[in-house]
Each structure stands twice: as structure tokens, then as C-alpha cells.
Amino acid sequence: MAALPTLALLNAADASAFSDHLGEVFEHAPWVAAAIVDQRPFASADALHRAMLAAVAARPEQARVALFNGHPELAGAAARLGDMTADSVREQGGLALGALGAEDSARWDALNAAYRARFGFPFILCIKRHTRASALAVFAQRLANDRATELANTLAEIGRITRLRLAGRIADHGLDGLHGSVVVQVLDSQHGRLAEGLRVALHDADGAPLAEAVQEGRGLTLLAGAPLRMGRYELRLHLGDYLRQLGAAGALLDVVPIAFAIDAPEASYRLTLSVAPWAYSLVCVREG
Amino acid sequence: MAALPTLALLNAADASAFSDHLGEVFEHAPWVAAAIVDQRPFASADALHRAMLAAVAARPEQARVALFNGHPELAGAAARLGDMTADSVREQGGLALGALGAEDSARWDALNAAYRARFGFPFILCIKRHTRASALAVFAQRLANDRATELANTLAEIGRITRLRLAGRIADHGLDGLHGSVVVQVLDSQHGRLAEGLRVALHDADGAPLAEAVQEGRGLTLLAGAPLRMGRYELRLHLGDYLRQLGAAGALLDVVPIAFAIDAPEASYRLTLSVAPWAYSLVCVREG
Amino acid sequence: MAALPTLALLNAADASAFSDHLGEVFEHAPWVAAAIVDQRPFASADALHRAMLAAVAARPEQARVALFNGHPELAGAAARLGDMTADSVREQGGLALGALGAEDSARWDALNAAYRARFGFPFILCIKRHTRASALAVFAQRLANDRATELANTLAEIGRITRLRLAGRIADHGLDGLHGSVVVQVLDSQHGRLAEGLRVALHDADGAPLAEAVQEGRGLTLLAGAPLRMGRYELRLHLGDYLRQLGAAGALLDVVPIAFAIDAPEASYRLTLSVAPWAYSLVCVREG
Amino acid sequence: MAALPTLALLNAADASAFSDHLGEVFEHAPWVAAAIVDQRPFASADALHRAMLAAVAARPEQARVALFNGHPELAGAAARLGDMTADSVREQGGLALGALGAEDSARWDALNAAYRARFGFPFILCIKRHTRASALAVFAQRLANDRATELANTLAEIGRITRLRLAGRIADHGLDGLHGSVVVQVLDSQHGRLAEGLRVALHDADGAPLAEAVQEGRGLTLLAGAPLRMGRYELRLHLGDYLRQLGAAGALLDVVPIAFAIDAPEASYRLTLSVAPWAYSLVCVREG
């Protein structure tokens, strides 16, 4: 696979090379990249992205709606028929929206139809930030909005989608707000040190394992270094094993479950825990 | 149903009425009650119980083993054939040991056969203190003991079984150590008060609901006022609902699970929790 | 000392005996007791007290102000000259307001003079609920109020003063809201039990000891069973001694200070603490 | 002031320049530096230091005791007469040991005399790691040791003293174990973030302020970046101010005192706190 170009390279490239490279950032709308090629050089990938969004926002509503209509429905017929851009396939594939059961497909189809009937364009969502459950919840909420709100929401979601796509096309993009994380630190309140050797695992709401790590004697324990989809998760501290190794276990606690929700995928969630044989505590800090 | 007699009434009763009333306390061994009838009056139900156990312990090993052999096997053929005392039926029924699937039945049968082959008497356990899982765990441990240890363990378990049976036959028994409990208190560290209105529920290890209560503005919240079988449980705090009512919810916590084990059914477990929108803590005190 | 009469006795007493017994409840105003003697019998001391307050409130402003003027100034000339009722001497004596240094006396005199000049009656405060610091703080606040507010505030304070005086004159008064308390409970999160044997001490803001107790294995530890004056206090947990006895001390903590304020003397303050060798936590619940 | 030389410079210097520069590292014993000059080059300042200590340890006991006797007594006559090396003056001056009152001087003199009478050399202590109180406590302990233990203890303390002196004479010394620290992190459990803006202050046992900082929205708050003398300290969280700014204050807590002891000056102490209007908690981790 060829290395990604740097921003400097894109700034210096032929207009056509520039447009080609960024032509699919906006779904079925290569005109967006073409519209900003003369604004080069861009000082940052963020400036480039803002220029692209501004180019869209400057178009009359009819043109924006045409852009919206270039997007596939989520879990819609296009997905099942294979008629999507490679990016969309990848994004929807993360939730296996192309492989829903008959009942779920019917539910999505009904929502998609209702949304399109109401607003005249498909429901668009930055699906990489969502679980199926959170996507359905947002879908129901947005269906109740008025048209002006949904014109704005749709553009905002396209902003999120294209920001992620741009980050995948520029080597030194430096875009922030893409770096959600879940970090854990477990303090041992009996021994006055980090709970070195304590195993922590991250599971999704259905109990499927996502990541696992062992607390070291220093520093933080990273369980997720990229944005997690919105939704519910469970952290599990293998406290009993840890305490038994120290000959310090009480009779009460073994695997300690911590159920929590991610509502801001791009934020950094830091879970600080303290443990003792008959007690534990949690405080969460959400940054960014 | 007739009222239970008091201890005073039993002390003053005919010898035969006394022996009749307590004849089934020891399984298929009415001689135990008869053996102590002349030691009346008893100052307490505890003294009466100790006298019964002493009468058994005073007999030669052969006689004690005969007593042991009067007990049905756990989940054994007697259970399936209906050939047990009413007390044993009730006690085993609590775990539905008479209705195991084929595989589980085979497992119990194998353990029972191995135990009886090794020691010459059935495996006896105060089943009211156990879940199936904890009973199986104890079974495996005890199978590895030597004979002297198992003679003592068996008598100790019969002591536990008969203590509970005696408590069910004397109105004013005053026997302590029968009163295990799980009590919860949730403190609201944001508002400086008890978390009035917070719903807490107790579930077994499989998630089945056992009890539910709402924290009041004063006092403790009782979730179990009688001994819980040994095993794992899950407490669930409906923290999200509570905080939303106060307009104080964070985005992190909703239903807070607290997984814990009961290893001493007759003890009092007090779980003290403090809650805030982005934090909670647990300390457990086990008394008695 | 003669025993206090019961409410029943007072309900049945001669009118003159009744009036004599309660004549000094309102400062220099025996007419208040006399005014309600014919409303007997009273169902409760609380009903009796409400009747006395109603008798005052029913009088025209001029008469109420005359009643107010029967009260001595706090730390005023009357205190220094010995010209107060026995109750007032006792109440002010608790703060040693009769023995202020020259500078403090001058400060109180200036405030008293300013208040009297502004409202035409002395500053009245239920001094048993206050430290000198909190009394001065309230004094400054109330000096800035309008006259109607201070007429009401003064009657409310007289209500508090006379409620306490009444409680001291009726054996079975049953008046609630007089029972502030500070109660402590220390949980040992390493051992899963109450921190039995841990010594806790209550000190005032200057470090002077007020009360001391040892945490027992069950129950709460009472440090104050009567209302504490408004102000700042310090609780001290002798954690190092406790942990050393268990062979569990860390190198960090010895005497743990907990600084807190009482702002509602009649409330119950319950301080729940959990301790471990390298950690501790506090949650306070204020009830009533 | 001239810049400190690097290790490379010292490795390459004239033998006499090397010996001159490091001649005073060992008190009144320039021969130590001279003894190792031919072992150059040293790979690290640590290797250099170990070589110096080895040169001392290789000498017979008599020579080591002579080296010990070149050290001034702590708070002794030499200090009062001004007869010490510049390094010793600086080190003892940190505790103002040259300016004790008559009673304290008498106490130190008595201990010094007793120690010298027992062991034949002065009591030597790396005074930079101690408060007066901890120095006196160690003094009393060591006075009870046997001679072999004190020969070893004295050499170990000289190792600590000279390590610090060496660090002050080599620019790129890279010596670890000199970097004790006190770091604080305050988590806001109501708002799910670091307690940005909360002021924390470090005081000594007598209440004198040592350092102050404000918790930022990210990262740790450094209160001491160099070793603190052994002894007791008090951290003060200005929680009331912080909560009032957020409109979230309860009526209980204002300045929160945290009393703690440093027993290992070269360790890193990290105090993690969580705060809420009616609650707070502390866990300490000591590393290294």
C-alpha cells in the first residue's frame, strides 16, 4: 500500500491530483474537493476540512439536499445490494448493518422510509461513532425534529464523517478530536501503590471482550486508544486474583464489574479506581 | 395450622408428647429426642439442641454412622423416588435437586457413589446454606478429606440441619446465628443525605431477581432478612433514575452492578455505598 | 432539686402555680404565661409553646417591641452589671460574653448601639445555637435588614429561646428539634468490619477537646448528643494507633483530621468514614 | 558563578584538577577523590560515586573511623564556633541547627557526647533528609545499636551525603534517587472532571506554608519537586472556594486538611483525591 501524502505534498500537487485524492471524501461529490483546490495552500488539515464544509454550506439548499441524497441509507437497500462507495461499505460494515436479520432490516427500512418521506433526504449519521442501539435511539429522536434542525444536523454529521475520511488520506493530518480513549488506573489503598498485576478487561454491553490489560506499577492502563462507539460497556477488574496473589483477599469481592456509558466517543475517559479487600471506589474524568 | 409450642410447654409436656414433637429433628432417629427427655427442663432451646448433639456424640462410631446412613443422598435416588422425610424434601427442594437434568444427575450420582464408597455413609450437607455451585464445590473438597475429618464434618452439618429444624418447632427458640441478612445503605455525597428514592435490587448469579427495595430518607434498606445461600450475588443500584429525578445525572453511570459473594450465610452483610454523578464507592462490613 | 412537673400536672395546676412556673420563659414578661392559662389543657408542650407565641404575636407592634426591650443586649452593659434574668445569665455565660476583653466589648457595644438605633429594640439571638464567630456574622447580616424582617426575625429567635427554656421546665416535654447530634461510623475497608477500637475525638476550631469515644464493633459512635453551636469543628481519627494494633499501618497516616462546619445545630450529622492503611474517605449525611 | 563541568570534562581533566574539584565531596578527606583518579574514565556519575565509596570501604576500620572523625557533630560546638566545611554549614543550616535555644543545644550536646563515648566517632546523618524531630528520633534509635551496625550506618549516611554533594558538582550527573516529590490530583466526582481551579497548599507540621498550586484541567499538580525532609506535613484543599465558584457548595466542608508523613524523602508521593460537596476521599501511592 502506498504511503499517504503529507499536507505539504497535497498543497504542491497538480490540481487534478489533489482533486482525485480527496474526491471521495464527500460521498459521490467530487465537486467539493475541486471547489477548494484554488484556495491552496492550506495551513492545516483542519483548515482544509473547514474549507470543504464551507464550500458545501455556501451552496443553496437544493444543492445541499442533492449532496445528502448521494448518501446511502443506513442498513438500507443500497447496503444489501452492494451499491455504496468503499468508504461507506467499510463504515457501515463495522456494525454489520449489511447483515441484519429480517426483523431488524424491516425496522431500519421503516425508519428510513419515514425519515425520507418527512425530509426528502436520507438519514445520515457518522456511523463510526455509534452502536446499533445508539444509532436507533438517535434516529428516533431526529425523526421528531423540524426540517431546519435536520438540515443542520445532517451537515454536522457529514462534517464528522468527512473529518474521519480526511484523517485517513493525509499522513500528518494533526486533526484532534479523533482520539477518544478509555484509560484505567487502579490504586491499591491497602498497600499504597498502583495495583501492579491487576488484570482489567473491557467488554461490550453483551459481555463480548474488547480489550484486556494488566495494571503496571507505574502509569495508566490503556484499554482503548481510539474512539469507542457510543453505548454501554463493562469494565471488569480481576480483583480476587490480584488480592489472592498478595494473600490479602477478603471473602466478598472477586471480579468487579463497572458498567458505564460512552456518550462522547472523541473524549478521553479516565477511570480511577481504588481497591481494598472489602471495598472499592470509582471516579471518572471525561476530558475533551 | 396449630401454633408452635413454647419451650416452657415442651419442658412441662408428657415425655411421649415431647418425643413426638421433636422426633423428626434428627432424620429417621426419634431415639435422639427420647434420649434427652429426662434431662428436662432445658433453660433454652440452645441447651436442648446441645443436649441432643451430645447424645449423638456419646454413641459409638458404629451408631453414629448408622444415624448418618439414615440420611438421603443429596440429589440422589431417594429424592427422585420420593423416599425422604418431609423436612428433607423441603430442604432439598429449595435447590430443586429433585429436578436435575440427566447430566447433572449423573454428576451428583457419581460424587455420591464415590463418597459413600470412601467413607461408608452418604454425603450430608446443610443444604439450606448452599447454592448448587457451592454445594458441588464443598462436595469436591470433602471427598479428599480423611475419615476422621468427615466423621466430624458430618456431625457438624447435622448440627446445622437440626438447629434449623428445631427453630421451626419451638415458638420462642431464641436461637441466634440463624439470622443472616443483606442490608444496604446508599449515601448521596453530592447532597449530603441518604439517597432517598434510589431503587436497589438483589439478583442471583444468573441475574434472576431476588428482592428489591427503595432507599428511604433514614435508616438501612433491608434486602434479605434471612440467611442467603452461599454463592455469588449481584446488587443493582438504579443510580441513573435517581440522579435524573434530581436533574443531576452525569453521562456515565446508569444501573450500577455490585457483584459479591456470601460465604457465611448466618452473618450480617452491610453494604455502604456513596454515590455521585461520576463516582461511587462501596465498603462492606460483615458481622457475626 | 425538685423534680420537674409533667405536662399533666401543669394542665391540672392552679392558675397561679401555672403562671409562676412558666412566668420567666419569656424574659421579663410573665403576662405571656398568664395569657394562656385559660386555654388549658394543652395536648403537648409544643401546643403550649405555640399558644404562648401566638399570644405574643397577637399583640400590637408596640407591645411586642416592649417585650423585645425587656431582653438584655448580648455582651452588653446589663451583662457586665449583672442585671439579667437567671436564664439569660446562663445562656450568655456559655460563650463567656460577660468576660470579653476591652476590644471585643467595644465591638459588641458598637453593634448593639447601631442595631438599637436602627430598629428601636435590642439585637436578640438564641445564643445557645451560636459560637461568638457565628453570632457576630449573623449580627452583621441582620443589621442590614429592614424593620419588618427584623420584627419577624426577633420573634423567631424568641421562639427558639423560649422553646429551650420550656424544655427545661417540663419533664415530659417531648419537644423535637432540640436534639442535634454528631455521630461517627468508621468502616475498615481492609478487614470488612467496623474499625473496632479506633479512637475518635471532637475538637473545636481552636483545637480544644470537646468529646472522645472509641468505635465499637457494632453501631454508631456518638460524639455529641445535644445541639452543637454553629461553627467549625475538627474530628480526629486516631488511625495510626488503630492500624498499628492490627500490624497494618502504612507509613503515611497517623491522626486524620476532618474539619467540618455545623450550620444547623438541631440537625443530626452522621459522618461515615472508611479507612485503609494508605487511604480514607468521608461522606456526611445531615438529617433534620 | 562558573558553569558546572560535565562528566566527560572531569574524565578528561588533569588529575589535579579532578581531585581539586571533588576534594571536598568527602568531608576533610581529599584523599578519596585522589584515590580514584586513575580509574577514569567513569561511565556515569553513579559509577564514580560507587568508586569513591569503595575506596573508603576498602580501608581498614581505623582509617574509616578517622574519616568519620573528620565530620562535625550535628548542632555541635563546631557548628557554633564556625569550624565546618562550607558544605556542612549549608546542610546543617537548613534546619537552623546552629541557632538552637539553650535547652535544645544541651539536648543535642548530651546525645552527641553519649554517641561518641559509645562508638568513638561522631553521629553522622544526611541532615538534608530530616526534620529536627526525625533526626532526634533516629539519633535515639541508633544510640542503641551495636558498633558493627553503626559502622555500616555511618558509611551509608556518608554515601547519602556525598551523593548529594556530587550531584551539585557535575552538570550531567543523571543520579536518580534524588528526586522525591509530592504530587496531587483532585478529581471532581460531581462533574466528572479534574477539579480545575481548586487551590491546594502544602504546609509543614507547624502550619507554615511551603508551597501552593492550583489544580489545572489536565495533569498532575506538583507541590514539591525535590525531596522533602522526613516528617509530618499538611495538605490543604481549598474545597469551599472551589465549590462556591461552581454554585455547588454544601454547608459542611471548607478547607480540607490532609495530614500525612514523609518517611522516604526520595520517593514520589502521589495523593489522589476525589471531592464532592459532602464528601471526599484520599488514596496515596508511594513509588520508588
Image (cartoon, coloured by chain):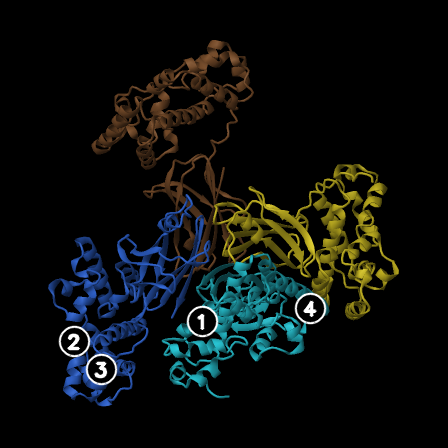
Chain colours: A yellow, B cyan, C blue, D brown
Determine the CA span between mark 1 and mark 2: 79 Å
Determine the CA span between mark 3 and mark 2: 24 Å
Q: Say which residue label 4 marks.
A: B105
Where residue B70 sits: x, y (%)? 57, 73
Where residue D28 sits: x, y (%)? 36, 16
Amino acid, disc 1: Ala
Q: Residue at x 41, y 55 (%)?
A: D240
Where residue C235 sits: x, y (%)? 34, 56
Q: Residue at x 70, y 40 (%)?
A: A43
Q: Is residue D166 left or right of residue A216?
A: left
Mark 2 falls within which chain?
C
Q: Is residue D159 left or right of residue B116?
A: left
| Label at residue B55 | 1
Closest to the camera, between mark 4 and mark 3, is: 4
Amino acid, disc 4: Ser
Image: A244 above or below D68: below
Instruction: Kindly tell me whether residue D52 is visible in this rendering.
Output: yes
Closest to the observer, D122 or A146? D122
Image: D54 above or below A202: above
Determine the CA span between mark 4 and mark 3: 72 Å
Amino acid, disc 3: Thr
Closest to the camera, between mark 3 and mark 1, is: 1
Say which quarter of the image contains residue C262: bottom left
Q: Say which residue label 2 marks.
A: C28
Q: Residues within 10 Å of mark 2 (few under 14, many from 20)?
A: some
Determine the CA span between mark 3 and mark 1: 59 Å
Which structural element holds mark 4? helix
Q: Say which residue label 3 marks.
A: C6
